[in-house]
C-alpha cells in the first residue's frame, strides 16, 4: 500500500511537470493571432491594437508610449514590446508583437535582409570593423498630440558619436520568435530586432563604442502616447 501511494505521488509530480511545460509553451506568441494587433485606422490605435497598416500610402504606424528612464540613461533599444524579455528597456514602450510588426512591413512592400527561415548571416554585410545590418532602408518619424508636424527619428534620438541613424529592415523573424526579446527597433545592427541601425555594427553599445538615448529637449514626458510612422525610402 505504501509503495502504491508513493507511486501515485511520483506520477502526480510527473503530470504537473508535463502540464507546466505545456503552460510555458503556451505563453509564446500565437502566430495565428497576430492579426489582432492591427487597428482599422490610425484614429483607433491604442495599446490593444497598436499597429496600423496604411497600404495605400505604404506606411506602417505604431502606437507606443515614452519611457522617461531612457531620456536620461543610455540604452541600445529604440522600441521594444513590453511583454518581451527586454520590455521596458527602450526609449519607447510598444504593445504589439514584433512578429506582427515584421508582417506589417512586409505588407507594404518591404524586403527584409533575412527572409523567414533564411540563413542568419544573410542579414549582414561583413566589413573590417564588424557586421552591419542589410535590408530595405526605412525612414521613421514620430508624432504626438500638441505638435505642429512629425519629427524625424534623428531629431528625437541622441547618438553620442554624432552619427545619423539609418534604419534597415533586417527582418530576423525566426530569431525574434525564438528569443522573444520584443525588439522592434535597435540603435545598432542587431540579429534579433526587426529594424536596426546600419550606421553601427553589431555590438556597438555592448562594447561601449557609443551610447544612445531619447532627446529630453524634444520628447514629451514619461508615459506620453506617441505614434511612430515607418515608410521605405524606395516607396516615397
Image (tube, rainbow, N blue to C red):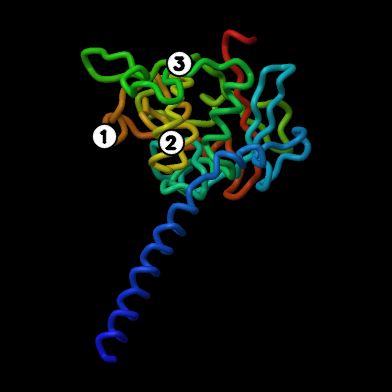
User: Going by the image, does 33 lie left or right of 120?
Assistant: right
1 or 2: tag closer to the N-terminus = 2
Q: Nearer the viewer, mark 1 or mark 2?
A: 2
Residue density around tag 3, few if under 14, some if 14–19, many if 20 or more, within 10 Å: many
Is mark 3 in CB contact (under 8 Å) with mark 1? no
Residue 135: which disc?
3
Residue density around tag 1, few if under 14, some if 14–19, many if 20 or more, within 10 Å: few
Which residue: 60% across, 15% down? 109
Tag 2 residue: 176
Residue 208 percent coordinates (x, y): 26, 34
3 or 1: tag closer to the N-terminus = 3
Whole-number angstrom distance, CA of label 3 to CA of label 2? 16 Å
Q: Is residue 224 visible?
A: yes
Query: Dot 2: what SS?
Result: helix
Q: Is residue 226 visible?
A: no
Which residue: 46% across, 37% down? 183
3 or 2: tag closer to the N-terminus = 3
Q: Nearer the viewer, residue 158 or 188?
A: 188
Amino acid at each position: 500500500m505504501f509503495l502504491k501511494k508513493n507511486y501515485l505521488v511520483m506520477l502526480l509530480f510527473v503530470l504537473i511537470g508535463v502540464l507546466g511545460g505545456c503552460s510555458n509553451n503556451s505563453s509564446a506568441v500565437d502566430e495565428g493571432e497576430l492579426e489582432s494587433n492591427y487597428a482599422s485606422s490610425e484614429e483607433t490605435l491604442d495599446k490593444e491594437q497598436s499597429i496600423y497598416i496604411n497600404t495605400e500610402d505604404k506606411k506602417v504606424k505604431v502606437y507606443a508610449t515614452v519611457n522617461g528612464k531612457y531620456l536620461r540613461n543610455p540604452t541600445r533599444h529604440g522600441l521594444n514590446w513590453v511583454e518581451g524579455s527586454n520590455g521596458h528597456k527602450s526609449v519607447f514602450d510598444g504593445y504589439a508583437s514584433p512578429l506582427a510588426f515584421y508582417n506589417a512591413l512586409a505588407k507594404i512592400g518591404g524586403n527584409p535582409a533575412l527572409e523567414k527561415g533564411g540563413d542568419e548571416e544573410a542579414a549582414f554585410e561583413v566589413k573590417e570593423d564588424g557586421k552591419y545590418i542589410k535590408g530595405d532602408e526605412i525612414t521613421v518619424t514620430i508624432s504626438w498630440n500638441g505638435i505642429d508636424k512629425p519629427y524625424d527619428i534623428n531629431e528625437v534620438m541622441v547618438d553620442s558619436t554624432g552619427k545619423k541613424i539609418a534604419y534597415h529592415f533586417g527582418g530576423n523573424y525566426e530569431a525574434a520568435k525564438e528569443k522573444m526579446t520584443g525588439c522592434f527597433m535597435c540603435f545598432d545592427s542587431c540579429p534579433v530586432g526587426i529594424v536596426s541601425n546600419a550606421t553601427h555594427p553589431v555590438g556597438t553599445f555592448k562594447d561601449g563604442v557609443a551610447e544612445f538615448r531619447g532627446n529630453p529637449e524634444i520628447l514629451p514626458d514619461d508615459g506620453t502616447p506617441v505614434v511612430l510612422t515607418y515608410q521605405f525610402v524606395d516607396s516615397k
